[in-house]
Amino acid sequence: MSVEQAVKRCYKGTTPKGFLYELSPDFPAFKGHFEKYPLLPAVCEISFCSDAAGRLLQSPVELKAVKRGKFINPVFPGMQVEIILTPRPDGWYLAELTDTKQHKKLCQIVVQFARRAQ
């Protein structure tokens, strides 16, 4: 299963501000990152942002660029994560990931997406 497919399986629905994902312990990226202390790699956090952007724009997207990332707290198996995407006037998005159970900010990433050719 690809990361993209695994991310789509984690999607649980919308929230008043964004998109909800639940990270099951069997999510593939947890297996190798790290033994006895699984956490979600930053590249996967960005993949979740891309999936949320596709849902927001109602069109498949691909990551075009990452301008800045601030990873505040780790993402562990079993977490429910809300992703809020705020468009900026310069064409970039501020993506904010929050642990919905503990109300802790997980990361902030400034990203840019491009619609995928179909």
Image (cartoon, rainbow, N blue to C red):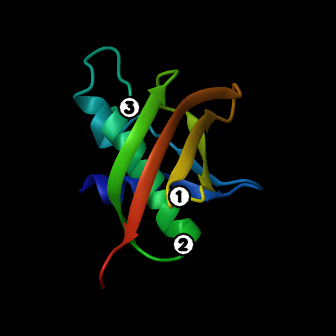
Q: Seen in the image, is 17 located left or right of residue 45?
A: right
Packing grade of label 3 (10 A; few <14, some 14-19, many >=20) is: many
Q: Residue furthest top?
A: 36
Of labels 1 and 3, earlier in sequence is 3
Mark 2 → mark 1, Cα distance in angstroms: 17 Å
Packing grade of label 1 (10 A; few <14, some 14-19, many >=20) is: few
Amino acid type at image mark 2: Leu
Secondary structure at numbered mark 3 = loop
x, y percentage for residue 113? 41, 62
The answer to whether any part of residue 76 appears in the image is: no
Q: Residue 98, located in which quarter of the rendered image?
A: top right
x, y percentage for residue 72? 52, 22
Amino acid type at image mark 3: Leu
Q: Which of the two discs, 3 and 2, sits closer to the camera?
A: 2
Mark number, residue 57: 2
Quick one: 84 or 92, which is closer to the camera? 92
Mark 1 → mark 3, Cα distance in angstroms: 29 Å
Residue visible at 53% across and 68% down?
A: 55
Of labels 2 and 1, earlier in sequence is 2
Mark number, residue 40: 3
Residue visible at 38% across and 68% down?
A: 114
Residue visible at 54% across and 72% down?
A: 57
Amino acid type at image mark 1: Asp
